[in-house]
Image (cartoon, rainbow, N blue to C red):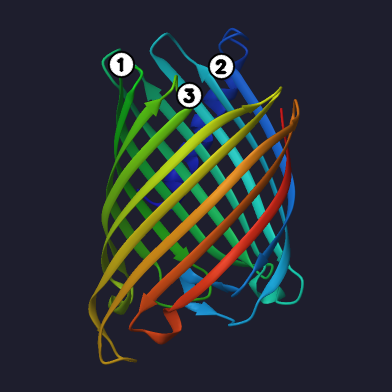
Amino acid sequence: MNNLQISKLILILGSLLLSTASLAGESKSRFSFDAGIGYLEDSNVGIADLDTNSGVSDTATTYDLGLAARVPLSRRWETRFAYDYSATAYSELSEFDLGLHHALAGLTWKPGVLDAGINIEKFAATLDGEDYLDMVQVSPSIARLIGNRLYLRGAFMHADKRYDTIAGRDARNQSWRGDMYMLIDNMDQYVAIGIQSGTEEADDAAFDYESVRWNMSYGHLLELGSRDLKLKAKLSHEGRSYLNTDESIGDRRNDKRLRLRLAGDLQLLEHLELAAHIEHSDIRSNLESAALDKTVYGLALRATF
């Protein structure tokens, strides 16, 4: 399935959602909008996907907005449509300014024993105001909630990546993913464990690789008087083994990518929250330009309706 066909399918599913919104009861249909503005400090500005970093720090302003809707078609079928945009504008290093458009259309079937669905997503990224990356991902999945305490989900993902200015990096990615959520204290806390295994085949064989990624996360909702405080910690590790010799190092490339993120969202008003996060990335590679050690501190105000 090519990008044009998938883009048309996204539009068809989105149109179906919008056309059925007037038919579904208001109490069952759910619509949301959010927008935010923030500030971050990045200790080593770069683009990990391009194996490049500046080696210097900078501050940036961040912007994001999103629209989402869930509309039931019947007791067992539900559609979902979402669009969000995020942007990072650096104070000095504008060549790393990044913008990302993301659209999603999904269809879920709920026969009772489990949920089955398919999501189709399109990503369009710009770098310093120029087209950078276009990616389409199709992801069928199955999921089951067991006794309001355990949630299991499995998915297959196929993605097509197209880079506008980088020869040889266009690629096809396929992966399998499994997640387990343990829900605690009436869902006010959770522990999640996930693992993903996949392969990527690029036009230039030097970029072909196999990868295994795992992640662990913990979330906790606290009530501070009339306000909610949502805390989340996530640790992830990915190992990439490239399948062919990289001419610049005369050997096969290997990456170990470790990320730790701590985040907290504090409700200020009914529709306004203050969000803060710290994220540390440590990428070790035998390709010198791909090695990365950075910490990002971020603070943002978000409105949700």
- State how far apart marks 2 and 3 are (Cα): 9 Å
The disc at residue 20 is 2
Which amino acid type is marked by label 2? Thr
- Residue 301 to residue 77: above or below: below
Answer few, some or many: residues within 10 Å of disc 1's Cα (few below 14, many 20 plus, some between 14 and 19): few
Q: Position of residue 174 (x, y in %)?
A: 29, 54
Q: Nearer the viewer, residue 42 or 80?
A: 42
- State how far apart marks 1 and 3 are (Cα): 25 Å
Reading the chain from its start, which is encountered first: label 2 or label 3? 2
**Do residues under tags 1 and 3 come within 8 Å of each other at their CB atoms?**
no
Which amino acid type is marked by label 1? Gly
- Residue 162 to residue 244: above or below: above
Q: Is residue 294 left or right of residue 145?
A: right
Q: Position of residue 118 (x, y in %)?
A: 37, 33
Which of the two discs, 1 and 3, sits closer to the camera?
1
**Do residues under tags 2 and 3 come within 8 Å of each other at their CB atoms?**
yes
Q: Residue at x 57, y 47 (%)?
A: 263
Q: Nearer the viewer, residue 223 or 38?
A: 223
Q: Under tag 1, what secondary structure?
A: loop
Reading the chain from its start, which is encountered first: label 1 or label 2? 2
- What residue did someone put label 3 on? 79
Q: Residue at x 55, y 30 (%)?
A: 221
**Do residues under tags 1 and 2 come within 8 Å of each other at their CB atoms?**
no
Q: Position of residue 111 (x, y in %)?
A: 30, 14
- State how far apart marks 1 and 2 are (Cα): 32 Å
Which amino acid type is marked by label 3? Thr
Q: Residue at x 63, y 13 (%)?
A: 22
Q: Under tag 2, what secondary structure?
A: helix
- What residue did someone put label 1 on? 147
The disc at residue 248 is none
- Residue 82 to residue 270: above or below: below
